[in-house]
Image (cartoon, coloured by chain):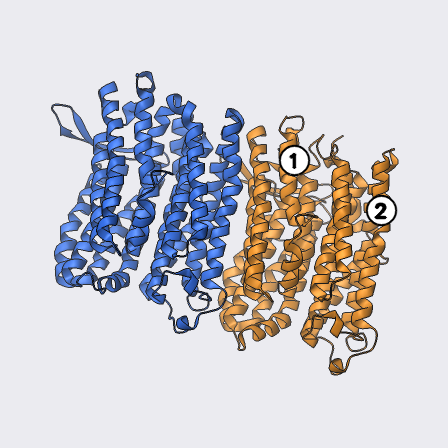
Chain colours: A blue, B orange
Amino acid sequence: MANNLLLLVLLASFLCAPIVYILGRNIGKRVSWVTFAALLAISLVFAGLMPTVEHSVILEEYSWVAAPVELTFGLMADGLSVPIVFTYLFVFACTALFSLQYMERRLGLDDVEENNEQYARFYTFFLLYGVSVAGSMLATNLIEFYLFFEMALVFSWILVLLFGYGDRKRNSLLYFLYTHIGGGALLVGILGAYWAMGSFEIADLANISSYPGAFWIGIAMTLGLFVKIGALGFHGWMPDTYSESPAPVSAVLGATSVLLSTYSLSRLMPYFIDVLHGVSGWLMLWALGTILYAGVMAIVQTDTKRLVAYLSMSQMNYCVLGVFTFIDYGVLGAISYSISHGLAIALLFLVSGALLYRTGTRDMTKMGGLAEKLPIVILATMAGFLTIGGVPPAVGFKSKFLLLSGAFVRGFESGWMELGVAILAGSLATLVTLAYEFRTVWRVYYGKLPEKLESVAGVPIMMAVALIAMSALSVIFGIWPALITNPIEVFIAHIFHH
Amino acid sequence: MFGSLWLALLAPILFMPVVYFLGRSMGKRVGWVALIPLLYSSLYFMSLRGGVAENPVGEYFYWLPEIRFGLYADSLSLPIALTIAVLSAIIVIYSQPYMDHSIHEQYHRENNNAHATYYALYLAYAASMMGVALSTNLFEFYLFFELMIIPSWALINAYGSGERERIGYMYLLWSIFGAVMFVTGALSAYADTGSFEIADLALVSGSPWAGFIVVSMLLGLTVKMALFGFHIWLPFAHAEAPTPISALLSPAMIGLAAYAVVRMLLPVAGVMDSGRVLTMLWGLLTMIYGGMMVLPQNDIKRLLAYSSMSQMGYLFIGVASGTAIGVSGSMMHYVSHGLGKAALFLSAGAIMHQTGLRDIRQLGGLAAKMPVTATAFILGAMNIAGIPPTVGFASKLMVFMGAFGPGLEGNSVMLIIAVVAILSTALTVGYTMWAMRRIFYGPLPEHLQEVKEAPYMMTVPMVLLCLLSIILGLYPGIILNPLFEVVPGLLPV
């Protein structure tokens, strides 16, 4: 294996962007195939790394800036990043496949012109978005991490701005401002860490708890990431951005939010266990509040995409809850749940896109009895819902169970508040989740088929393939969870049992 | 015999895609393919029967470094798993004519897809129930417990009658409610003992959390058993599920919760025994309430649904008594109720299939027209009422002997409970016999003059069930003797 594999992969994928753009201007929508191939190829590289990171860490370092501070440009693939990056890019690839027909329909609407230039832009930014996020998950120092993090924000903002529905200027501004302020808080934490220990290296955070101000550094980073994950109070951007973006964009936004923020929390927060242990119970409570609030909001939605948006907000916060248990099973559960959730949420956004594509509406009160008409879509819905509900045989079961095990252990160690959080997260929140999921299944797929929808046809083949591929991965991970959990366990063992 | 516990458990699941894809072209006849794995599981479990009393079989693997999944067949879990396998195998034969008819009524055309999905879900459902019976780990138990909910929900939702979507949703929410209560207790037990092994649950005895853990797991399980207060979903779900599924839902699935109480909660010292008066009263209340509710029912399946609820009261009283004989009696009653109630549901289904009616007021005098169905109904009724020569006699007798145990030790409340429980068995005899009379005797109404006996594929399964219950009734020792060697070991000293 080349000893600069990660750099090559990253560079090659960035270089694909101009190629996609130029090709797109000439061949139009068919450039989605190129994007798909590029993303799939990178994701397969990471799938191939999976066995390697079960026993070792791949680390590449290049000198980047010498003065005034010495910065290295490092890339690291370990048990934490590889499964997440793989899932993430796989979702991107499937979404690219799905977007082919969907974007054709989207660009056919009045407010934007359909031409090759639009396709070229869409797929270029789409690709850049995916690669930037992958970059921030491989970064070894905080500046590099932050750089990719902000790049991802900019590219996704462009996608929302150019291709959203409704008042897309307002929505994208809201999205940008919220996330940028979150990024600002993160930057405060990063600079604080540099000021305290004189280094931007993530690995050097290991000694952070011995520095004064470590508590506030941890809090600043946490709050910054809480915006990304839509914690209650910081979630203002989320429902609008998610529901008014075209389905492929919502899908990757949803997957990014959960995967990138859980990755960042699990990468950074274990260094702060000593200083943050005291407040972590309150952070768990905050997460529980978000889970319940968004869960209840999801029950009352009648718009499919708003439903998925709230559902995503609700479930992502399980990951926050898991990480802040600071218990091995809790963190392991949170990371694997983020993978399950990333897959499932993208799947569900694509499902709502497929429903919109075929029925022309997002209003669930106008749907019903679609199970017969759209068998593949209901299968994908069930795969997504079962994953999110933590119901076997989907992968969500194991991850949620581990996460809750961690929460209960923490509860028994720490006291009533933490135990209460664990109990409510395991009982009430699960009940709420399954209530809105199966209510949706009933409303959309069963009951009486409205006359207007008598003539609905099945989904186009590429959409079907994308939905099936993602559902299949969720079930495969569910049946052989060791595929993803083995590498993650190595990472967990490394932080909890030195 | 060739195989292993895991293979016997997973065979139905491995057959799911086969059944589904074959079913799309074969239609209803794919039921025969679905029979293969179920038959294999039944035969494999049967082949173990002789040996497990001395040498229980356990097969384990590590799922996570510290979490071990296993299947364990001893003379407590094996009869349960065997009952499930045998019932599923018999009922899958019955499903073919029945589902053919009901799918026709629903879609008004041939629908191979509907058959394919039905049998695939059926297999998943059967396998998950066997998994619940054989699990050795709470994590694994919960996995199968949740897995059981989904196919049964889908079967009600897609193939049920009446307001099936609403009822399916209600069934699902109640089941999940029970599951989350259970998992709260299970995770607390893990946090307390650091182990997910079911065998290690007894270690929580004496911990300050023991009460919380046992109570929340118990409440979760009693939702599944539909004890009084948690029973709202049962009459709807069991009455409106497709009849072959009712015949599995009703005895096989809900009784599993009683098995779980025996396996998991009785070994914990100091909790179940200190609440014995309450739990036995709860069982009694369920028994009487369910029995009373049977009487005014005019819908033949709703009638059977309430009678299941009432029978769960018997199961629970035996378990709650905490005596070796009562607990063994309950586990035995799981088997007899399984055979009896399945026979009742199948004959009710045969009546619905042949007459198109399920309102008892419109039925009557059918014994002459449908002799086999009538016989199956009588034997099933005798079985759940505990009348010899059916196996129900032995099991109910033991439940009562167990219930008297604590009573005779000088606790007068217990004694009263036991006496009332015995007297209320008259209720069971009463309602089953009265239903018999209304359905099978009396004048034959005009509109039923042309009714014929159900096809062989429906009558043969009923006959098999009745034969089994008589064989076991004559030789109850086949199950009881080995059962008696395990149960005392589970009770705290």
Locate residue A24, reporting x and y percent. Answer: 15, 59
At a point 50% along the width and 51% down the height, the residue shown is A435
Tell me if residue A336 comes above or below residue B430 in the rendering: above
Locate residue B155, reporting x and y percent. Answer: 57, 61
Q: Is residue A343 left or right of residue B213?
A: left
Locate residue B476, reporting x and y percent. Answer: 81, 52
Q: Is residue A87 left or right of residue B209?
A: left
- Residue A64 visible to the viewer: yes
At a point 15% along the width and 47% down the height, the residue shown is A15
Q: Quadrant of the C terminus of chain A?
A: top left
Q: Nearer the viewer, residue B55 or B19?
A: B19
Tell me if residue A364 comes above or below residue A45 in the rendering: below
User: Which tag is nearer the camera, tag 2 or tag 1?
Assistant: 2
Residue B160 falls in image quadrant? bottom right
Residue on which disc 1 sits: B214
Residue B360 falls in image quadrant? bottom right
Residue on which disc 2 sits: B420
Locate residue B273, reporting x and y percent. Answer: 75, 33
At a point 40% along the width and 70% down the height, the residue shown is A453
Q: Looking at the picture, which amino acid does disc 2 mark? A: Val
Q: Looking at the picture, which amino acid does disc 1 mark? A: Val
Q: Are marks 2 and 1 on the same chain?
A: yes
Q: Is residue A390 left or right of residue A136?
A: right
Choose the circle earlier in sequence order: 2 or 1. Answer: 1
Q: How many marks?
A: 2
- Label 1: how many Cα within 10 Å (few below 14, some 14–19, many 20+): many
Q: Secondary structure at mark 2?
A: helix
Q: Label 2 to label 1, Cα distance in Å?
A: 27 Å
